[in-house]
Amino acid sequence: MDKLERIGSFKQSPIIAGETYKAYIPKPLPPSPPLDLSYLYPLLDKANSAIGRLDGMCMVLPDANLFLYMYIRKEAVLSSQIEGTQTSFSDFLLFENDEVPRAQINDLTEVSCYVNAMNYGLERLEFFPLSLRLIREIHKILMNNAYDDEKLPGEFRSSQNWVGGSRPGNASFVPPPPEYLIETLDNFEKFLYQSNIKMPALVKVALAHAQFETILPFHDGNGRLGRLLITLILRHEGMLIRPLLYLSMYLKLNRQQYYDHLQSIPETGDWESWIEFFLTGVIETAEQGAKTIQAIVALFDEDRAKISNSGKSTAAVLSIYNFLQDHPISSTTKIRDKCKLSLPTVLRSLITLEAIGITREITGKDRNKVFVYDRYFALLSQGTEPL
C-alpha cells in the first residue's frame, strides 16, 4: 500500500506581493487506499472498553449531571489553554460566581463561550443531525466574544488563512483556498452522514477531527471547535450515554505530538499513526475520568460521614454542603441567595464545615468571603493550570 496516494492536491496561488504559496486540498474521507487497522485492533478494543467503564461509572454518581457540569467547564478551560489563554479552572469558577479572578476578562469570556457552545451543541444533537449547519451555529456561539467583524462568527471564511508564519508565503500549512472550501466541506459532511461505511466509531471520530483541522473552515476558533466536535461526534455515533469524554487534557500534555500528527497527514498520508495517537488519548482520558469519579464518590461518602459524626449536622450545613458539590468555589453572598439562608447562618455553617476539614476560605477578608470545597476542587482541577 502506498500511503502517499492518500495525499490530496496542492493549489498554486497567484503572485501576491512578489511571492506565491501552495494551499492544500484534502481528498474526501475515508482514506484511499483503505486504512490498515490490523495492528490497531487491540488498542481499539482497549479504548472501547475504557469508554464503556467510564459510561458505567456514571451509575454510581449521586448526580451524573453534576459531574458533567464540571467536566464541560474543565474541558473549556483546557481547550482554550491550548490556544494560549491564561485562564485557570479556579479563575473561571470565580468568574461564574461573579467574583474577581486573576485572569483577563477576554480569556474568561472565551472560556465561557466554549461552555455555551458545547451545551448548545449537545442539546441540539437531541433533535438535529450533526451537519454543517449545526457546526456553523456552534461556531457563532463559540465566537460570541469576537469583536473583530472579520472573524465572521457562524460564517465560513471567504479569504485564505494559514497556520504558522506571518503570511501564507512563509506559513507551515495553508488549508484549502476559499473557492474550494464549500466542496471540501460538502465531502466532510457526507462522511459524517454516511452509514454504509464499515468503520469503528472511534476511528471515524479520529478521521473527522483531523480532517476538520486540515480544512480550517473558519477565520478563527478552528482548534477549539475541532476539539469540541470530538465529543459531539462521539455522542452522534452513540458511543457515550453521557458526554463525559474530553480529550483536551491529553492534547494539552502532548500538544507537540498533536500538532506534528496533524501536520504529517497532508505530507505523508499516514492516517494510522494519528489514529494510534488518538486512541491512546481516548484510553488515558477515559481511565482517568473513571478514577476521578471513583475518588469523588469516595470523598462525598467520607465527608457526609464527617458531617454526621460532627454533631453539627443541621439542615443548613447539609444544604450548603450539597450546594458546594455543584459550586465548589462560592461566595457567602451566593450561598445565602441560592440556599435561602440568612448570612449569619451561612457563616456559622461554613465555619463548621471548615472546622471538620471540608471547606477553606480563600480571600482572607472579613467580608465578602469566598470558600472552596478543597479536596473536591483539587480532584476536579488536576492539570488545569495555564501553560
Image (tube, helix red, strand yellow):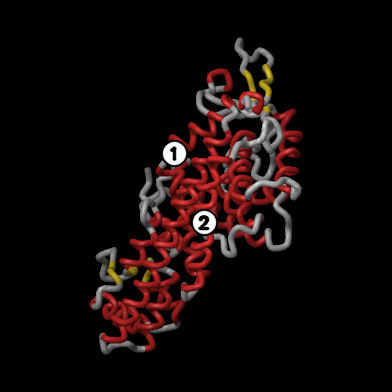
Q: Residue at x 68, y 59 (%)?
A: 124
Quadrant hosting residue 294? bottom left
Q: Which residue is mark 1?
A: 255
Query: What residue is shown at x 63% (from left), y 50% (from top)?
Result: 201
Looking at the image, tell me whether mark 2 or mark 1 is earlier in sequence order: 2
Q: Does residue 176 show up?
A: yes
**Residue 220 at x, y = what percent?**
58, 38
Could you say which is closer to the camera, residue 213 or residue 234? 234
Place of residue 13 in the rendered image (x, y in percent of width and height, measured from the top left): 67, 17
Q: How many marks?
A: 2
Where residue 160 appears, as percent x and y from the top left, is 65, 27
Looking at numbered disc 2 in the image, what kind of residue is underneath it?
Answer: Leu
The image quadrant where one finds the C terminus is top left
- Residue that label 2 marks: 245
Q: Residues within 10 Å of mark 2 (few under 14, many from 20)?
A: many
**Which x, y percent locates residue 52?**
53, 61
Q: Is residue 154 above or below residue 163?
A: below
Q: Residues within 10 Å of mark 1 (few under 14, many from 20)?
A: some
Tag 1 secondary structure: helix
Q: Which mark is residue 386?
A: none
Disc 1 marks which amino acid? Arg
Whole-Å distance between the Cαs marked 2 and 1?
18 Å
Q: Is residue 56 left or right of residue 187?
A: left
